[in-house]
Image (cartoon, rainbow, N blue to C red):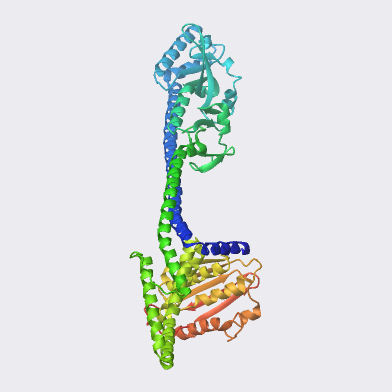
Amino acid sequence: MTMIGAAIRALWSFIQDLKIKQKLVLIFFFLMIVPLASFTLLAYKQASQVIEDNTIYSARQSLEQAASSIASKINSASLISDYIILDEEATRVFGRMGAPSYGVPMQVKDSAYLLRLFHYLLRNQDIFLIRLFVPDELVYSGDGQSIYSMKGIRQEPWYDQLASSSVTTLLSPTTTHYTDTSGSMIENDVLSTIRFVKNPNDFSMNMAVLSVDILQSDVQELMTKAARMTNTGMMYMASSDGVVLSTATSEQTDDWRVTDFTIEQWKRTSVQGKQAIVGYQAIDNTDWTLVSVVPLDDILTASSHQRNVWILIMLAMAVIAFLLAYISSVSSTKRIYRLIFKMRQVQEGHLSVIKQNFGRDEIGELAENYNFMIKRIEILIEEQFKTGQERKNTELKLVQAELKALQSQINPHFLYNTLDLINWMAIKHDVPEIESLIGSMSNFYKLSLRKGRAIVTIGDEMLHLQTYIEIQNHRFENSITLIWNIDEEVMPYEIPKITLQPLVENSIVHGIQMKPDKIGTIAISGGLKDGVITLRIQDDGIGMSAKDLASMPQQHSKDEWHGYGVYNIHERIKLYFGAQYGLSFASIPGAGTTVEIRFPPVLDRQNENEGGF
């Protein structure tokens, strides 16, 4: 702090020693540059925030739309799966699959029905394929179009997952293999809703596996369109067991993989060590989650053009501001230098008026006053030689009296101007602590005086106390925390002025400031109960010994703790409200002290003037 203070004083001394022209250039320049730079920074931040908000809004809308569309496709597949299971004729077919008398003619008939049913249901545009995996011994298990043997799926990871899962329907990525009309084998990646087909006669038996498939490319297309609407970022869909369907490459997806879905959505967050804005939404009736990731770098890039434009504008305005400041300072100081030259001639004994035209501004008025002063001096010199010593002494006494009268007028005015100057300098040099302290001091004495009133409301007393804490925190570097919880209903009731402040001062000076870290909290609570208002002041200072506690506040002691302040508070409360009211104390050494103030509720009572206290 000492080094900083020395540096500030050195800087201020340097500024004071600058020529007026240099000071004017600096003043004019900074009066234009500082607001312009602040405005540029604010405009850039606002523009960046608008771009970010718009990006988040677009990403949110796209994510919700994509999630809804994907959920709709999955729901269509699930409904078709339910339809097949609940179809009356299909149920009879599933029941015959395990029967020993299931002959070939009946199998051919059943397979024809199932294929017709599947062909009918495939008119739904969301569905790519319906696959039924049946026991190997059935003659239609090798259909290759919609009916397949269960032999080829028992090794699939999803089969074990379906068998061990408690859910009825499993949603999983799979690959379809079927032969088209030309005899070519075609593979497609699909997202399948898979379920076991139960024997309607014995639900403990799994007769087949039914899979209703939608193309992964259709799902990825929905995610791609949604991600493209944000102009940046990517989108992917992940299951609870880590399976991912993405719109980007696997490497890019791994770089932006979100593993913690408890983070706050649509806020700046860290993903794999990189900053991004993330949103996610669960797909209805599934364990899949759709995730949207917008890298923060993309948003910053979008606002870089706006930033560059504002910087160019600020630089251009800075050049213009400097030129205007220089021209204005030269114009003003040129006449001042001429005036200084004339004054130096006066110092050498050459009294001569200024004959040049200095204009009608403040400098011109100063030149006129200079001429008037020179002429007046010449007259006084002539009169001095013509008058005698007696006249001289009389005039000197008169001048001295006038000077004293003037001094009596100047001193209060000078003090006012000095305080105002301190406040102006605090604002100018961006020292809000000084400005805040002067404001707090002014409020403190304004609340203390209260136009001579001896009684104030509890609300006004709390305002006075808050101002006092603000001043103390300037002194003790914000080490005092004030917490108060007083019922609003008691705020209009009356209390003797400056009751709380001395008690709080004791808590600070003799309680908190005696702690090693000198940091503490003062809590004030109160309310109205059984016709008595009780206010409690509790601190977490060092507390008091039993001996000190027993002497509070009956003894009229003059030591630092008891003082006239605490004694007078207790006496004023008893005099104003009655002997049954006043102060009481409780303390735990090392833990803090509690002061309780008890007085009756009084409203609209005529204020008394005690002459100040």
Q: In the image, residue 181 lies at what x, y percent?
A: 46, 7
Give the side of residue 520 with respect to residue 312, left or right.
Answer: right
- Of residue 38 and residue 394, the one placed in the foreground of this image is 394
- Of residue 579 and residue 502, the one placed in the foreground of this image is 502
In the rendered image, the residue lying farthest to the bottom is 390
* Residue 492 seen from this side: yes
- Quarter location, residue 58: top left
- Give the residue drawn at x 41%, y 61%: 332
* Quadrant of the rendering where the N terminus is positioned: bottom right
- Of residue 535 and residue 33, the one placed in the foreground of this image is 33
Q: In the image, residue 65 lies at what x, y percent?
A: 41, 33
- Give the residue drawn at x 64%, y 69%: 515
Vertically, is 267 above or below 545?
above
Vertically, is 268 above or below 430?
above
Q: In the image, residue 544 lies at what x, y percent?
A: 63, 76
Q: How many marks?
A: 0
In the rendered image, the residue lying farthest to the left is 360
- Of residue 174 and residue 473, the one placed in the foreground of this image is 473
Q: In the image, residue 178 lies at what x, y percent?
A: 51, 12
Give the side of residue 505 with respect to residue 392, left or right.
Answer: right
Vertically, is 478 above or below 84?
below
* Residue 600 seen from this side: no
